[in-house]
Image (cartoon, rainbow, N blue to C red):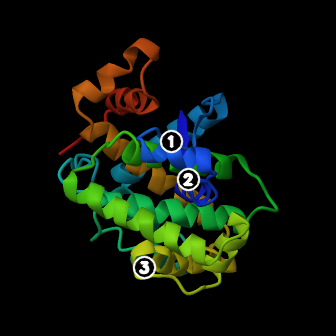
């Protein structure tokens, strides 16, 4: 499962030496893409989360209401939060993120930043659920930013603008990326194009003490729903081209969705 972290990529570009800069100018790019082995624990967490979402849909009387292929609105996450009796802070985080009214690409980018902020703030602990969220966050960003999964021309332009904004914000606050994330968490001044201001407001809700019990379960639910959305929307060519190497992880997720009997509308 390949990993691509937007902040790490921007930090590497900012500190690139003359050789790497010259390589970029002639079209040779070396991005921060690293693979991780999908552990049995991560597989169990993913399967458990899918079964949990399936049960939530059944309890809500929405078992036949599938994940729409036309628009991403975070319906599984919102429904899960409503039925799991999550804290008011966690509920507000979903509302503040505007997951129901934003484009899929912007939601991926926002929650990618939010996950990084929460990981840095929770660096005293390292639970399996945190690792799960980090790996899914970086993998989903890899699929969108590097594989153009679900990415049309407008989404491509939006992502490029946001990446440039993040690079600009990082250059104004150069130093340790963790210190930069701490600054974002505390509300440093950033340009609107970077998306950091909204990430700051969402993470503020999630990092409240009352949301501690729900924080990583909520983030995990967001990433599982996003990964399922990509699995559904990627065409057959995308799934088929990597079969020689065993297939993309997202392709296996799609098969599991059909085995579990998820409906799609």
| Above or below: residue 141 compared with residue 88 | above
Judged from the image, the secondary structure of the residue bearing numbered disc 1 is: helix
| Above or below: residue 195 compared with residue 253 | below
Q: Is residue 180 left or right of residue 205?
A: right
Residue neighbourhood size for the residue with mark 2, other residues' Cα within 10 Å, grouped as few (<14), some (14–19), many (≥20): some
Q: On the image, numbered disc 3 is attached to which residue?
A: 96
Count of residue discs: 3
Q: On the image, numbered disc 2 is attached to which residue?
A: 9
Quick check: marks 2 and 1 in contact, CB under 8 Å? no
Q: Where is residue 236 in the image (x, y as percent from the top left)?
A: 23, 26
In-front residue for pair 7/243? 7
In-front residue for pair 50/243? 243
User: Could you tell which of marks 2 and 1 lies nearer the N-terminus?
Assistant: 2
Q: Distance between the residues labelled 2 and 1?
A: 15 Å
Q: On the image, numbered disc 1 is attached to which residue?
A: 23
Quick check: marks 3 and 2 in contact, CB under 8 Å? no
Question: In the figure, residue 132 lies in which quadrant?
Answer: top right
Mark 3 vs mark 2: give the one in front: 2
Judged from the image, the secondary structure of the residue bearing numbered disc 3 is: helix
| Above or below: residue 223 compared with residue 235 | below
Q: Distance between the residues labelled 3 and 2?
A: 27 Å
Residue in view at x 36 percent, y 60 percent: 160
């Amino acid at each position: 499962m390949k990993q691509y972290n937007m902040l790490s990529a921007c930090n590497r570009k900012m500190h690139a030496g003359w050789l790497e800069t010259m390589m970029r100018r002639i079209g040779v790019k070396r991005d921060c893409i690293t693979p991780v082995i999908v552990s049995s624990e991560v597989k169990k967490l993913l399967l458990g989360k899918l079964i949990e979402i399936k049960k939530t849909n059944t309890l809500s009387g929405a078992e036949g209401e599938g994940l729409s292929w036309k628009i991403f609105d975070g319906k599984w996450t919102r429904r899960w939060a409503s039925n799991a009796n999550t804290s008011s802070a966690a509920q507000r985080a979903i509302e503040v993120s505007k997951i129901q009214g934003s484009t899929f690409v912007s939601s991926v980018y926002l929650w990618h930043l939010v996950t990084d902020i929460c990981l840095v703030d929770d660096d005293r602990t390292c639970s399996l659920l945190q690792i799960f969220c980090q790996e899914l966050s970086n993998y989903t960003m890899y699929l969108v930013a590097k594989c153009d999964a679900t990415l049309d021309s407008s989404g491509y332009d939006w992502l490029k603008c946001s990446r440039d904004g993040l690079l600009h914000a990082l250059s104004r606050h150069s130093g340790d990326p963790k210190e930069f994330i701490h600054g974002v968490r505390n509300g440093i001044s950033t340009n609107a194009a970077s998306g950091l201001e909204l990430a700051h407001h969402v993470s503020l809700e999630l990092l409240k003490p009352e949301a501690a019990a729900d924080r990583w379960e909520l983030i995990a639910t967001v990433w599982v729903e996003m990964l399922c959305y990509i699995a559904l929307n990627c065409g057959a060519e995308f799934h088929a081209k990597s079969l020689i190497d065993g297939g993309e992880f997202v392709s296996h997720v799609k098969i599991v969705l059909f085995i579990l009997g998820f409906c799609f509308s």
